């Protein structure tokens, strides 16, 4: 079942068209990475999904309910952090959570649970102004989690974090998804930040969706190849062609379509038996980052 379905979403800021016919589907239990370069329209889309902007064109359904008619019921099941963490700087993590707990009317016991979940139990009376950015991000996520939402929407939660902070964030989100079944929609402009975590990917560029699918579907857009370097590449290419294998030269290597491990061994044997030294032979998989940069129209 899908947790979130967006269809035909468009948006303008005065005369500027920002989003054009966005379709998006987040399956229940997914970690969906919503990727795109700066200014692509990610935050605008997320603000529309959360009812922070009025939908001009299109339809948004969350848990099978329509946002335009069931907004309150939907938002009771959604937690979010949009455009950076915001907390009361002069209060501790616990006191910040207490403020939100009263708004959400959650049981008092939920505060300790959330502090533990986001790894802030040891911060005691330390004020948020003394927190690192990573701690502030975790507190903001904790606040979003207080009412045990089924869907968590996070806008660039790794922005500004150092490598350790990003790893911590990934562990936190993976744990939430695994242990609590929380569906997570997370935006980022860097695939590397969320690619390891995500089960599904949506790519937006210039206000249009340019890809949506699973991580494996993204990978399958560029099938693996076999790359070789030999003592005599032109002659090797002729031998391959005689065996019915088309080859190309890319970055000083012979590149042929993917084949089974046994076929790779056969090719190797044929070349060696023809007196050609095979310096290097192996299956090469294109990395997701270069696929992503191609999708958003940036040269890798
Ligand atoms: P970033 O990663 O930089 O936050 P984004 O993908 O989240 O980018 P948006 O913040 O949705 O992109 O912005 C999309 C476009 O809409 C940008 O061109 C931005 O300048 C424009 N925009 C955003 N908010 C407004 C606004 N309130 N009024 C007018 N234009 C806006």
Image (spheres, rainbow, N blue to C red):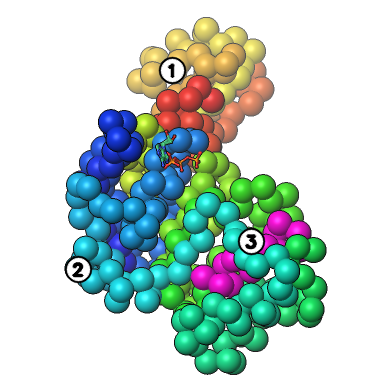
Q: Are marks 2 and 3 in contact (CB under 8 Å)?
A: no
Q: Is residue 44 magenta?
A: no
Quarter placement of the C terminus: top right
Whether residue 198 sits left or right of residue 252 in the image: it is left
**Nearer the N terminus, badge 1 or badge 3?**
3
Q: Which residue is mark 3?
A: 137
Q: Which residue appears at 28% of the width and 42% of the height?
A: 11
**Nearest the eye: 56 or 41:** 56
- In the displayed structure, does residue 81 sit left or right of residue 75? right
Quadrant including the N terminus: bottom left
Q: Nearer the viewer, mark 2 or mark 1?
A: 2
User: Does the residue tagged 3 have its C-beta within 8 Å of any atom of ligand 1?
Assistant: no
State the residue position of label 2. Answer: 69
Q: In this image, 250 relative to 52: left or right? A: right
The numbered mark at residue 247 is: 1
Q: Is residue 211 visible?
A: yes
Question: Closer to the camera, 127 or 3?
Answer: 127
In front of the other: label 2 or label 3? 2
């Amino acid at each position: 079942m899908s947790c979130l379905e967006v269809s035909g979403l468009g948006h303008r800021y005065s005369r500027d068209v920002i989003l054009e016919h966005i379709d998006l589907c987040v399956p229940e239990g997914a970690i969906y990475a919503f990727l795109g370069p700066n200014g692509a329209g990610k935050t605008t889309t997320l603000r529309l999904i959360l009812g922070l902007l009025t939908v001009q064109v299109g339809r948004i359904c969350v848990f099978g309910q329509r946002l335009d008619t069931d907004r309150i019921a939907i938002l009771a099941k959604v937690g979010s952090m949009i455009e950076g963490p915001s907390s009361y700087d002069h209060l501790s993590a616990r006191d910040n959570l207490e403020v939100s707990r009263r708004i959400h009317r959650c049981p008092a016991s939920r505060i300790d649970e959330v502090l533990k979940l986001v790894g802030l139990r040891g911060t005691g009376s330390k004020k948020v102004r003394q927190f690192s950015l990573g701690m502030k991000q975790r507190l903001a996520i904790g606040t979003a989690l207080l009412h045990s939402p089924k869907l968590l929407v996070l806008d660039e939660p790794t922005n500004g974090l150092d490598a350790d902070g990003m790893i911590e964030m990934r562990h936190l989100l993976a744990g939430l998804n695994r242990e609590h079944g929380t569906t997570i929609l997370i935006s980022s402009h860097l695939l590397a930040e969320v690619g390891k975590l995500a089960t599904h990917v949506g790519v937006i560029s210039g206000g249009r969706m340019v890809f949506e699918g699973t991580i494996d579907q993204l990978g399958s857009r560029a099938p693996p190849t076999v790359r070789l370097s030999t003592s005599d590449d032109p002659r090797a290419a002729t031998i391959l062609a005689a065996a019915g294998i088309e080859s190309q030269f890319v970055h000083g290597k012979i590149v042929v379509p993917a084949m089974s491990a046994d076929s790779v061994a056969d090719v190797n044997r044929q070349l060696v038996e023809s007196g050609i030294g095979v310096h290097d032979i192996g299956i090469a998989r294109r990395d997701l980052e270069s696929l992503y940069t191609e999708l958003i129209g940036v040269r890798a």
